[in-house]
Image (cartoon, helix red, strand yellow):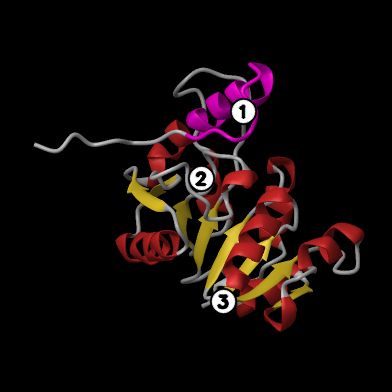
């Protein structure tokens, strides 16, 4: 698959390294392809990884991953001239103060700003250290998926499962706000309450 990753920070770099190692063609869409951070993300990726502008990366990708800080999201999305039909995997979190229901999810805002894109929320509820496909003993890392386009969600779910994770359908895009709350809880547990980043949430089902 041709995958464009917008952003070369911790999440973008982790997913780029994972997927390039699995044979996918990766293009990072960034403001400065020659920056030290981008070059670090490219290191070890081989011929299947390169960096270019945001607009060129979006045009390239069968799937586009949004992995930039929330404050950069509107400007980055505006750099692409046409989102029509693109599968946009939104891995961002707003993480702003406010109670449930006080604002739309970041995923819903992304869908408005990238008009025409088939938005699926994913990879936003755990840390980048959990994005290398490693398991916790017998348990794979759960990746919650929210989206209104069933076809796009199925494509993302197939990629997630093939990458060593468990895809969990978490409902429509409106439910992305709930997953963003899960992300906020993960950050609290990992960094504010001293558990460290090697933790995950897991949906377990009782058989019978």
Mark 3 highlights which residue?
A: 24
Q: Please provide percent x and percent y for residue 175.
A: 39, 38
| Residue wearing tag 1 | 187
Q: Taking 72 as reference, is 163 left or right?
A: left
For the view shown, which residue lies furthest in the bottom direction?
47
| Dots 2, 3 in contact, CB < 8 A | no
195 lies left or right of 79: left
Spot the residue most to the left.
Answer: 208
In-front residue for pair 137/149 = 137
Disc 3 versus disc 1: distance between alpha carbons?
Answer: 30 Å
Q: Residue at x 67, y 68 (%)?
A: 80
* Residue 92 is inside the magenta segment: no
Q: Does residue 196 show up magenta in the picture?
A: yes
Q: Is residue 25 left or right of residue 161?
A: right
Quick one: SS at disc 3?
Answer: loop
Observer-nearest of 99 and 42? 42
Count residues near mark 1 (Cα–Cα under 10 Å), then give few for <14, some for 14-19, many for 20+: some
Q: Secondary structure at mark 1?
A: helix
User: How many discs appear?
Assistant: 3
> Which contiguous range is marked in magenta?
180-200
Q: Secondary structure at mark 2?
A: helix
Looking at the figure, which quarter contains the C terminus? top left
Determine the CA span between mark 2 and mark 3: 25 Å
Q: Earlier in the sequence, mark 3 or mark 1?
A: 3
- Judged left or right of residue 159, residue 96 is right
Give the residue pinned by disc 2: 107
């Amino acid at each position: 698959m041709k995958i464009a990753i917008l952003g070369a920070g911790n999440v973008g770099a982790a997913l780029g390294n994972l997927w390039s190692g699995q044979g996918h063609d990766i293009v990072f869409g960034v403001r400065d392809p020659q920056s030290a951070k981008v070059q670090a993300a490219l290191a070890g990726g081989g011929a299947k990884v390169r960096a270019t502008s945001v607009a060129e990366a979006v045009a390239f990708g069968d799937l586009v991953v949004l992995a930039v800080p929330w404050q950069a999201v509107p400007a980055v999305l505006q750099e692409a001239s046409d989102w029509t039909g693109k599968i946009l995997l939104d891995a961002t979190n707003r993480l702003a103060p406010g109670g449930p229901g006080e604002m739309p999810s970041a995923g819903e805002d992304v869908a408005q700003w990238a008009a025409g894109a088939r938005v699926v929320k994913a990879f936003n509820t755990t840390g980048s250290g959990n994005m290398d496909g490693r398991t916790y003993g017998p348990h794979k890392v759960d990746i919650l998926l929210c989206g209104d386009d069933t076809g796009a969600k199925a494509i993302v779910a197939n990629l997630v499962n093939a990458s060593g994770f468990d895809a969990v359908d978490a409902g429509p895009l409106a439910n992305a706000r709930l997953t963003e709350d899960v992300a906020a809880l993960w950050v609290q547990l990992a960094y504010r309450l001293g558990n460290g980043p090697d933790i995950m949430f897991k949906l377990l089902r009782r058989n019978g």
